[in-house]
Amino acid sequence: MTDTATLERTCEGTTASLELTHALTQTLYREARLLDDEHYKAWASMLAEDLHYHMPGIETRYRRDKTEQVTDLTRMAYYNDSKPEILKRLSRLETGTAWSEDPATRYTHIITNVEVELTEKADEFRVYSNFYAYRNRNERDEDSLIGNRIDIWRQVGNSFQLVKRRAILKHNVMLSKNLNIYV
Amino acid sequence: MRFERIGREPDYSRYMDLKEGWLDRRIFSDADIYEEELYRIFARSWLFVAHESQIPNSGDFLTTHMGEDAVIVARQPDGSIRVMLNSCPHRGNKVCFADAGNTRRFVCNYHGWAFDTAGDLKGMHEEYCYDAGDIDFKNHGLKNVAKVGNYKGLVFATFNSDAPSLEAWLGDFRWYLDMILDNEEGGTEFIGGCIKSVISANWKFGVENFIGDAYHAGWTHDSGTRSMNNGQPFPPIDMDNSYHASVNGHGWEFGTEGVGDLFLLGRPKVMDYYNKIRPKMAERLGEMRSKIFGSVASASIFPNVSFLPGISTFRQWQPKGPMQFELKTWVIVNKNMPDDIKEEVTKGVMQTFGPGGTFEMDDGENWENCTTVNRGVVTRHERLHYRCGIGRQIEHDTLPGIVYRGQYNDANQRGFYQRWLDMMTHDEFGKMPARPEPQLGNVGETRDLPGLFAL
């Protein structure tokens, strides 16, 4: 992981070209569509082999409290996964006995506020975005998961692979019974 | 001290017959019964509030709930731990809004009333507005709970001044608890942070699931088991050498094969670690407990804490009304584990029993639908079946408690609801029957005792 660009959030990054920004924005939209449609194999093909996918748990703490909640990977997290670990989670859906996915959950991922920045590596790009992931299942189950993402995407030929993602869900108490969703 | 609702004298024994093995569904949704649970169970029991490792230093605090009462748990300068209502005695506002942190004072946002970490009132904004005789500082601190206790790192508190000692409350269940709290030199700690989620179900469904329901695991969690272990199904259950043990409403269901839950965690390095320390564990806890630890097992401490020894999820089901609870999840590890094993355990727990975990995902929906469907006005009058294994009680020369053979059983669930009924019907705590009579002493000795537990 040390060989890839960092997820550090900057105020003065170098904005990528219009063409590159368009290409990566379209990549995010494509990813969102694959997740909406539960095309997880196709989604997995967008993930780099050295992926780190992280969604930390966020405690409510006073401003003076400098406990590092986001980047300390030893703390509790919804996701703190490598690619093989993501694939393990996804394999549950192929067993035919994932009862709480049948009937299927209905998903919509809305991705906004996309910014693309150049990094210290020529083939890797830092991509900021916001997500609104809506779920509805059975009769009245519904919830909304909203937050920010910082990604590193790597150009491989004419397409891009996700190398790092940090998704910050804004919930303290996650207002749902589970998290059967990727954002 | 008694906390009572006025005008309530219902006969709770009509809601169940545990000798026959049935429950009335109304206990899972009725608002009056829920209110009474808050008074008679949550305001009177010893309740888990923290692991001592969460607040190691003077001034460290965390906030949590005892029943629906908001409390602060704070480490004192002398190293002791105090638990107090998170509510200002002036107008009742919260005095601490953080989940955790370190402080010298809790200060109310409303009028600036300031309390030290013991809860004593130390001052307020524009103190001159109070004339002599208006306020006695000594009597206007944050209300402390009646008792605080610590069993091998787990901190409990109770609002009930008549409650027995924590050791007596846990009783012989300590023999089992030591398998998770004391299986290695150095004891345990919690990994930093807490994941909280909301499940629209009655709190008792979570507790009873962990106290004894091994039966659901192979079916509900088929997909989770296979995903974590390359398609392999749930490990076989040996009905002759697996058990339910119930002590005063606490319960532990377990096998004796030593590896089932470690297998389900899906982290081979963790399995290797425990297999390596197992001979030492046997010296520490005796042969029997070293074989129980790591097997397919789950446990609950009455009324609302559960854990999976071996998988290492530790959780509390916080009641939020009759049809909702908040699930707080932590990871418990041995303090002396190498960091890479702690990381393996933490990742394993979050991939199995976090909200996005391959096991957890299939539980919540079951409990939610048990709760909402049971509320139907006709449905609620139909009995629920809790009779599995009702004839399999045994006397066992090693295992304390009320023991049943075969971990596919409703025995611990019946033990939990028996204790629930005891607490709902007995006004005087001391008159509740022991279930069963304790065999261990109350002096903190929970090793296998020669002569008492022959191996």
Image (cartoon, rainbow, N blue to C red):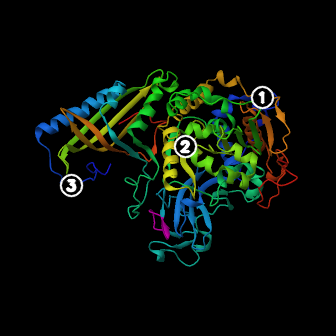
Judge left or right: residue B106 versus residue B403. Answer: left
Q: Which residues are magenta?
A: B102-113
Q: Residue at x 31, y 51 (%)?
A: A2
Q: Is disc 2 in the same subunit as disc 3?
A: no
Circles 2 and 1: CB atoms closer than 8 Å: no
- Asked if residue B345 is among those painted magenta in the image, a careful observer would answer no
Badge 2 is on which residue? B327
Displayed quadrant of residue B296: top right
Q: Mark 3 against mark 1, which lies toward the viewer?
A: 1
Q: Amino acid at mark 2?
A: Leu
Query: In the rendering, at what x and y percent does residue A114 appear?
Result: 22, 40
The chain that hosts pointer 3 is A
Give the total of numbered labels: 3
Q: Amino acid at mark 3?
A: Cys
Q: Nearer the viewer, residue B415 or A153?
A: A153
Q: Nearer the viewer, residue B160 or B261?
A: B261
Judge left or right: residue B130 versus residue B259. Answer: left
The N terminus of chain B lies in which quarter of the figure?
bottom right
Q: Mark 2 against mark 3, which lies toward the viewer?
A: 3
Judge left or right: residue B227 versus residue A115. Answer: right
**Distance from the alpha carbon under mark 3 to that under mark 1:** 64 Å
Give the overall secondary structure of the magenta segment. loop
Q: What numbered label is drawn on residue B389?
A: 1
Displayed quadrant of residue A52: top left
